[in-house]
Every structure is written in C-alpha cells, then in structure tokens.
Image: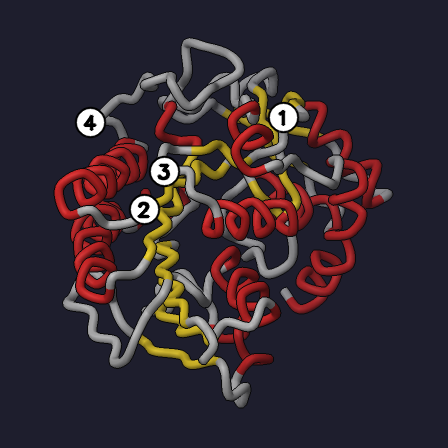
Amino acid sequence: MSKRVLITGGAGFLGSHLCDRYLSEGYRVICMDNLITGNADNIAHLIGNDSFEFIKHDVTNYIHVSGDLDLILHFASPASPIDYLKMPIQTLKVGSLGTHKALGLAKAKNARFLLASTSEVYGDPLTHPQAEDYWGNVNPIGDRGVYDEAKRFAEAMTMAYHRYHRVDTRIVRIFNTYGSRMRLHDGRALPTFMRQALKNNPLTVYGDGSQTRSFMYVDDLVEGVWRSSQSDYVDPINIGNPEETTILDFAEEIIDLTDSNSEIIFQELPKDDPQVRQPDISRAKKELDWEPRYDRKKGLRMALDYFQQKVGED
C-alpha cells in the first residue's frame, strides 16, 4: 500500500504545491482546508485523482481521519500580514488549537509530524543572518504578535509532543517564498509589486525601502520540505534563499522584469516590520543536503507568466 499523508492548509499556496509533490512521490494525499485563505482552484486539477482526497474542515476542531496515516504536514494558517491582521483570533487558534489537534492525530496514528513554522519566529532580529539557535526579538503584544507568537507556541507544542509523547516530529522555518498560486491581494511584497507593475500603477514601498528580505522560489521550498519529511533530523531547520535584497532594489527589479512604466512611492513603515531577513542555511545544507536551486532572477522569470495571467483576470 502507498504511504498516506495529511496536508493541513492543503488548498493554500504552499500546501497545494506540496499536494502535487507528494502525489508525484507515490503518496496518497488527504488535503484538509477550511478555505478561509486557501482556494479550491489550487487543487481543482487533482479532483478525480484516486490518490487524492479533499476534506473541508477547520483544524482547530477535532480532526478525524479514518485509516492509517504515515505523515502529517501542518501548513494550516493565515500567512500574510493582511490576513493575520484581519483574522487575529483565527491565526492564534490555528497555531495553538490547530497544532494541538494535528499533533494529537499524529500521536494516535503513530504518524510523523512536520510543522510549517516561519522566519517570523525571529521577529525583528538583532542577529544577522538568522540561524536556528537565535531565539528571536518578538513583540508579543504588537499587531504582528498574533502570527509570530502563534508559530513560536506551535514550535513549543511540537517539541513537547516529541519529548513527552515520543511523536516523531520535524520543524521547518520557512522564509519568504513566491511562485504560482499566490493571491494577488494577499499583501505580501512580491504579489503586490507584480500587480502594481503589470498595471503600471505606482509601487508602494514602506519606509525608505532599506529593509531587506530574502525570496525563495516555491519549488525550492517544496524540495526542502520533502527532504525534511524524509530525514531523521528533529530540531528546527531554516528553509530559505540567502540571496538578500533591499525592498527598494526589489521594487526596481520588478519594474525592470515587467517592463513597467510604474514609479515608486513611499508610505509609512508598519509597526514592528523586520529591518533585516536572511536565513543561515548551514543546517539545511548539512542535515538535508539542501540549498536553493533557483536564484531570484531565474525564479522571478519563471513566476512572471502566472502573475501576468492573474492580473489579466483581476
């Protein structure tokens, strides 16, 4: 019998790409999503596949899956500022209650559990680049705290289940990722800049644009998650592209890529917005033999067709 994986948040941007990958690796895939930020269109091409099943469900409630499970990928969560600022309670609940329910299922099924954590656990970091042994600089009562602290709690819960209940767990800390199936209006820098540039509207840069980010193409993320799920390494691992750029330079790069006539305008920097973001991926290289295959220039070219199509439909 094929191995069986449950992917929570499976109709989202990242989750749907993981559904594709695990199906291609011979798994039977159960995709679970309540569709508050996920989109059924992302998995429409999988409907009718005998190895794929979709369950519409909120994972903050009791999760029932009949039959055996070998692996759970817990990717359910709002993941962009516009989402978690609009849905702060849901974000906190899915990181806490949802993680608890998913871990309980992993324990009951004797399944391996992989948590999708985030670079946001580092907050506005005081060390650069960020390695996994850095504990972070997070404002727990700030607007962004609902996401940052939900993920930090999820990591603590995951390690507690590993140590106390002997659940076989993995944690990946995901840095900024882009590619097809992103929502144009999700508030993150790349889809926002693509939408604005392709419409020849002004690109909105917050602050003076000197803050940095590191952008990873989605295929690299999927490969990193796959390798982590197949590895024996338990402690958190950064999955990201260390190719760092300022937001202002990135905006100019998108204008050049899209051959846009857009100009750049500046707006007030949001509170607690991280000033730097760059992963130290030494651990991923050592433990997973993983590093990104796509530099930003190539990845953006690969993603451009998708954004052109989405802007045409917008």
Question: CA separation, marks 1 and 3?
Answer: 22 Å
As drawn, 249 above or below 218 = above
Amino acid type assigned to the residue bearing label 2 in the image: Thr
Where is the C terminus found, in terms of image quarters?
Answer: bottom right
Judge depth for marks 1 and 3 and give the one in front. 3
Task: Mark 4 or mark 3: name the one nearer the start of the chain.
Answer: 4
Labels 2 and 3 touching (C-beta < 8 A): yes
- The residue that label 2 is drawn on is 169
As drawn, 54 above or below 214 = below
- The residue that label 4 is drawn on is 141
Amino acid type assigned to the residue bearing label 1 in the image: Pro
Task: Mark 2 or mark 1: name the one nearer the start of the chain.
Answer: 2
Amino acid type assigned to the residue bearing label 4 in the image: Ile
Amino acid type assigned to the residue bearing label 3 in the image: Val
Q: What element does badge 1 sit on?
A: loop
Q: Percent from the top left, x then y, of residue 263?
A: 74, 32
Identified at 41% across, 26% down, the residue is 270
Task: Mark 1 or mark 3: name the one nearer the start of the chain.
Answer: 3
Q: Percent from the top left, x then y, of residue 311?
A: 68, 60
Question: CA separation, marks 2 and 1?
Answer: 25 Å
- The residue that label 1 is drawn on is 242
Q: What element does badge 3 sit on?
A: loop
Pointer 3 local density, CA inside 10 Å: few below 14, some 14–19, many at least 20: some
Q: What element does badge 2 sit on?
A: strand
- The residue that label 3 is drawn on is 234
Question: CA separation, marks 4 and 1?
Answer: 29 Å
Task: Mark 4 or mark 2: name the one nearer the start of the chain.
Answer: 4
Judge depth for marks 4 and 2 and give the one in front. 2
Where is the N terminus found, in terms of image quarters?
Answer: bottom left
